[in-house]
Image: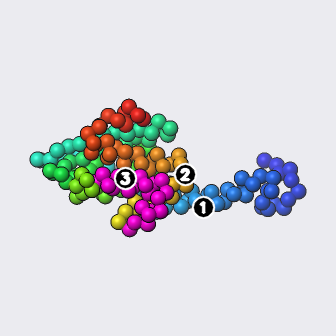
Amino acid sequence: MTDVTDRPKGAPNAAAPEAAARPDADARLAAIYQDIILDHYRRPRGKGALDAPEGTTTLAAERRNPLCGDEVSLQLALDGDVVREARFTGRGCSISQASASMLTQAVRGKTRAEAEVLVRRFVALAHGDAEAAGDKAMGEMRALQGVARFPARIRCATLAWGALDDALKGDANRGERDG
């Protein structure tokens, strides 16, 4: 591509302010793909079919993002009111799959009520809630706080959490209906 301006090579193009802003956007995008997110994407925890321990109740739900094609199917094994095991299957971008991986770790050992609080807290974090993003109890999930700057990615990050909410509420097919 030929540069038709008289500006020196590498100088910002005042006629195209969006181009000058691109380095900042690139830096923000790079922030999203932090090492922890990539690690969960490349080595997902809790991925695979659930082999529910004997005596547990299973809950399941699926969610799809029709905008990008990401899919997450979540299965939980509950011992009474406590989540003993959480597994997921699915496919999609690093954000959706890393978020599902983090979810399976975070929800184990939580009561249903604690898991519901965790869903609300994570969704708030993904939407840019500063208090949730600063909550050290959110652990590795805080790595996903950067998606708040990219509205299209918020849905990717919250996909598995929507499935968790559906499963806890016994609405396994909501994600199928709503997309």
Q: Nearer the viewer, mark 2 or mark 1?
A: 2
Q: Position of residue 95 (x, y in %)?
A: 45, 51
Whichever of callouts 3 and 2 sits on the residue coming sooner in the sequence is 3
Q: CA distance from mark 3 to mark 2?
A: 19 Å
In terms of depth relative to the viewer, which is nearer, 77 or 40? Answer: 77
Residue identifier under label 1: 27
- The reply to whether the C-beta atoms of the residues labelled 1 and 3 are less than 8 Å apart is no
Amino acid tagged 2 = Phe
User: Could you say whether the residue bearing mark 2 is in a helix, strand or loop?
Assistant: loop
Residue 95 horizontal side relative to residue 10, left or right? left
What residue is shown at x 66% (from left), y 60% (from top)? 23
Tag shown at residue 150: 2
Q: Position of residue 169 (x, y in %)?
A: 27, 42
Amino acid tagged 1 = Ala
Q: Residues within 10 Å of mark 2 (few under 14, many from 20)?
A: some
Tag shown at residue 120: 3
66 in relation to 115, above or below: above
Residue range highlighted in magenta: 115-136
78 in relation to 129, above or below: above
The answer to whether residue 92 shows anywhere in this view is yes
What residue is shown at x 75% (from left), y 54% (from top)? 17
Hey, which quadrant is residue 168 in on the image? top left
Residue 22 horizontal side relative to residue 105, left or right? right
User: Could you say whether the residue bearing mark 1 is in a helix, strand or loop?
Assistant: helix
The secondary structure that most of the magenta stretch takes on is helix
Hey, which quadrant is residue 58 in on the image? top left
